[in-house]
Image (tube, rainbow, N blue to C red):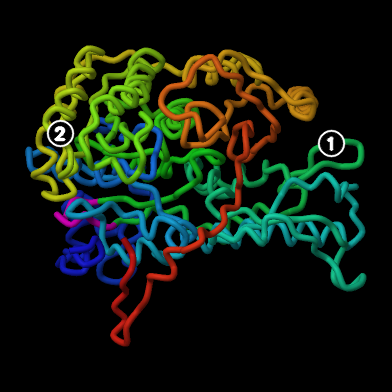
Amino acid sequence: MTDIEIAQAARPLPITEVAAKAGIDERFVECYGRTKAKIDPALLSDPGEDGRLILVTAINPTPAGEGKTTTTVGLADALRKLGRRSIVALREPSLGPVFGIKGGAAGGGYAQVIPMEDINLHFTGDFHAIGAANNLLAAMLDNHIYQGNSLNIDPRRITWRRAVDMNDRQLRFITDGLGGRVNGVPREDGFDITVASEVMAVLCLASGISDLKARLARIVVGYTYDEKPVTAGQLGAAGAMAALLRDAIKPNLVQTLEGTPAFVHGGPFANIAHGCNSVTATRMALRLGEYAVTEAGFGADLGAEKFFDIKCRMSGLRPSAVVVVATVRALKHHGGAAKGELGEENLAALERGLPNLLRHVENIKEVYGLPCVVALNRFPTDTEAELSRVERRCRELGVNAALSEVWARGGEGGIELAREVVRLCEEPNDFRFAYPDELGIREKIEAVAKRVYRAGEVAFTGGAEKELRQLEALGFGALPVCMAKTQYSFSDDPAKLGAPEGFTLTVRRLKVSAGAGFIVALTGDIMTMPGLPKSPAAERIDVDETGRISGLF
């Protein structure tokens, strides 16, 4: 059976029962039909003790697949089977990848969150609200210029872009305001995908409505002719933007196939907008569960780094253990094996690819001071020799590798992993960040590049040097950095697989996300608006006359 067929065959519990299982009083539950609900953040004002926070991350992603969300869901189900009260906290999927490459992002096999179709499509309308808030600010910005431009905004130095939740390369660079004076002021413009919008990062990091409004007001939309920043607050947009986001800020409650409560809320790009689900959803999972299992986007060099250095730094959240997901197939890809040969035993390629996994593990342990386990997501083509090789190399580094079969067996296939996670959560840890707050922007970037990526040096283009000086002069130097880098490599070159070191990382642009509260450092060829592939997943997605959807996976 396909993922969607497995999901459609499930008999989900009424969401009110799931909420009751999670210990949520009915006064905080706002039902969206039978199987979805919004949970009022006022729940967090009630007294209670927090559980243990577990982060699931992975090696650098490959075409072979790793299964990070699947592992996250399966681990939470497995903890329930051990009698532990677990809650999942996941990111919402973007429509763009769903119709472009991925086809869905709700886990897989027998380790999924449901209703799978709703989660992968419009869900509860959060992304629409985020896009609307983003574009309201864009409209008010251009209207201000059209109506006389009392703030003296330089149209050539506008940094705020429009957003749409779809992969559409045609919208990356556009010219708008054409057709005469009544249609606005002509200028170069462009669209980002909604998940790359700063509004998404703001929503995910805000602690409540008041903090949301304050963050929205701080968003820098451009600069004046005399190079002073202009904010959303100066345009008078923050209140209306917050009104559009009033319901979107409330976490969404759904369930796994096995009925484990799951919060699915917020889904920013891991290479541009920090890549973690909302702080509020994570806090709810911690408050309601003994174990809160969450994830961060892409590999540990991007998602986990931002989870620690941005999300934990800003929120005070402290993880108890980390799971690094890997597959034998993906490691062989990192070792140079061709995609069509990944199902064949190849110990030489596996050995060449293993340094990618081992470096991520080493970073978790040595850079961030956290206990770690490798979740080895098992495929039928994996041989005993290959699995043993991975397990042995992990033990040499002082960590255990647990076989995970949650895709095929659900929670039952994650018992070994769950037992190791419980054990690790009882160990003391020395959690720390990759850099202290007091470093300058350049030094923070160098800390991540050299300590986490293993770069030899960091080069700044002339434009980036100018932007660095300007941002520090404007008082933004104390902010953490959000590294925008390819997800496929430790370096800024996606072709450098495995564990490259000693390379030069080039920072080509710096910009401030003042509302989110970080500096974005763009390296390599990072796009904030993806395109569709030659054969998009949309070609295989359909709906019949009964409303039954097919083609999601």
Q: Is residue 22 above or below residue 504?
A: below
Res 204 seen here: yes
Name the residue: 57% across, 53% down.
530
> What is the quadrant of the C terminus in the image?
bottom left
Name the residue: 49% across, 29% down.
496
Please tell me in which quadrant of the rendered image residue 211 appears: top right
Residue 497: where, in percent of width, then height? 44, 30
Label 2 CA crowd tier, 10 Å (few <14, some 14–19, many 20+): some
| Of 34 and 175, the residue lying toward us | 175
> What is the quadrant of the N terminus in the image?
bottom left
* Badge number at residue 265: none
Label 2 secondary element: strand
In the rendered image, residue 27 lying in the magenta stretch gets the answer no
Q: Name the residue under label 2.
A: 403
Please tell me in which quadrant of the rendered image residue 146 appears: bottom right
Q: Is residue 430 above or below residue 60?
A: above
Q: Is residue 274 above or below residue 94?
A: above
Q: Name the residue under label 1.
A: 228
Sequence-first disc among 1 and 2: 1
| Of 248 and 81, the residue lying toward us | 81
Magenta span: 254-261
Res 436 seen here: no
Residue 405: where, in percent of width, then height? 14, 42
| Of 238 and 81, the residue lying toward us | 81
Residue 542: where, in percent of width, then height? 37, 76
Spatial separation of the CA atoms under disc 1 and disc 2: 55 Å
